[in-house]
Image: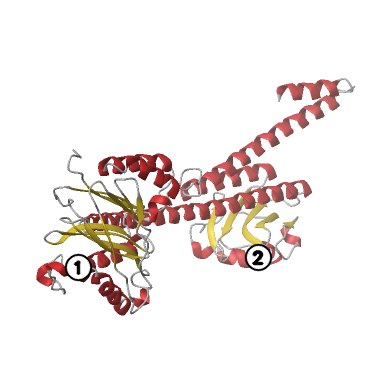
Amino acid sequence: MIWLWTHLFLGKWAKMNSFDEIHQVLNQLVNENKALNLQTRLLDSFVAVVRSSANQTIMKESLQRILSASLTISQAENGSIFLFDNNGGIREKIFTKNDFSNEDNPNAVPNVLDTGLAGWVIRHRTVGCIEDTQRDDRWIAYADQRREVRSALAVPIQRRERLMGLITLQHSKPYKFGHETVDLMQATADQIALVLENIGLYAKLEDSYRALNAAKEKVDEYSSILSNELNKGRTIQKEFFPERSPDITGWRFRSFFKPAMQLSGDFYDIFQIHKNHVGVVIADVCDKGVGAALYMALFRSLLRIFSGSFPSYSMLRLKEKEVQTEALKTIRLTNDYIVTFHDRMATFATIFFGIVDTDTGEFSYINAGHDPPVIFRGDGDRETLMPTGPVVGAFPDVHFKIKETCLRPGDLFFGYTDGVTDAVSPTGKIFGKKRLEMLMERYSNSARDFERGLKARLFEHIGDAAQTDDITFLVVQTLQKKSGN
């Protein structure tokens, strides 16, 4: 800035021939310096107003500085700033000292704005300048006004169609406010309007953030409650799965279950029905989440009770030679119950229910629309247990056909849900049945190795991708007499 003044001064000095001309240039530079300082004061005040949106005391002090700078720029003796709310009421008012005797009395202000020059400006939404109050009927002198006013200037603070406030300036001598002053104060009022608009937007943004944070806290609270409830549900659901597999000489039972969500619609069961008969169930309730989990519990309970695994309350009276045939009626009873009492929910399940005689290896089963389990024979052959009827819970009066096979020493039975074959990798590829069949052939001699190998390859395939469906499988193996497994 000093360099600029020096450059201007020396440039003009070369063209000056008289002391008066030099004196004029010096006065011009001094005035320009004063104007620059005043503009800096206004800018600082505008910045303070922006920062004061949450603090009324700071805002009032900032507006007082803006008024003080305006008085200096215009050379006015006194003035005021009014800010209006959205309804046209006074939100804030700033006066120079000794302007009105009742300046702190809110009832003394409205009539000033309704009449006189201020009222005229508010009605017309334009600058009002009175060169001499004694010659302009827009001026009204008030009884509590302590100073005589001869020059008056009122500038609206407005943004587009909205009137935000008013700046007034007065002087005791006439003809004090020229065009230069009017233009400067109009620019000042425009800047104040812009700042106030930004404050309003910032305040709305702050309100939105506060509301958003409050909503987030509520969501977090509800989420925590829901998470706790779901964890309780998951703990309860675990109780529906067998705590341990039957310990029967010559047989190995292995299983694996991993839900995609906190609650699952998949389920499996391995339980003794009558002496040497073991029930093997693997099923998948349509849909996922809480609803599927509730129906999973219902299906599982019905299968247990109807099959005779809880003799005291069983609806079946099982005889040794009819255990498998009678127990498999469970599927029809379960289907009829769901269709009769829960048909409006349109919920169904795919179920494979097999009953094996652990003395003879005889294996009777119903496959109600489930993915076909596979029996790997000890001699290398393979048997696929295809569906023998539709899904359970969708149609009334369904006939489910019972089929029979046999599990001989060295055979391995594998049942699973579609969460195994449909498992998705990070690149979107599914695990697939071919990959599963290769693993079956590789590990078909050991239930334990098959379970471990399938889990390792399956989750290696999934990697860090999201698990999209429940993963459930079980393995039943008959041991050869010389096998140490």
SS of the residue under disc 2: helix
Please rate how many residues cluster around mark 1, counting C-alpha atoms within 10 Å: few if below 14, some from 14 to 19, many from 20: many
Residue 119's label in the rendered image is 2
Residue 307's label in the rendered image is 1
Q: Residue at x 62, y 67 (%)?
A: 114
Percent x, y for residue 432?
A: 45, 49
Q: Is residue 353 left or right of residue 117?
A: left
What is the three-letter code of the residue carrying label 2?
Gly
Q: Residue furthest left?
A: 312
Q: Is residue 165 left or right of residue 15?
A: left
Q: Residue at x 30, y 73 (%)?
A: 335
Percent x, y for residue 184?
A: 72, 46
- How many numbered marks appear? 2
Q: Quadrant of residue 12?
A: top right
Between discs 2 and 1, the one toward the N terminus = 2
Residue 431 appears in view = no
What is the three-letter code of the residue carrying label 1?
Ser
Residue 264 appears in view = yes
Proximity of marks 2 and 1: CB atoms separated by less than 8 Å? no
SS of the residue under disc 1: loop
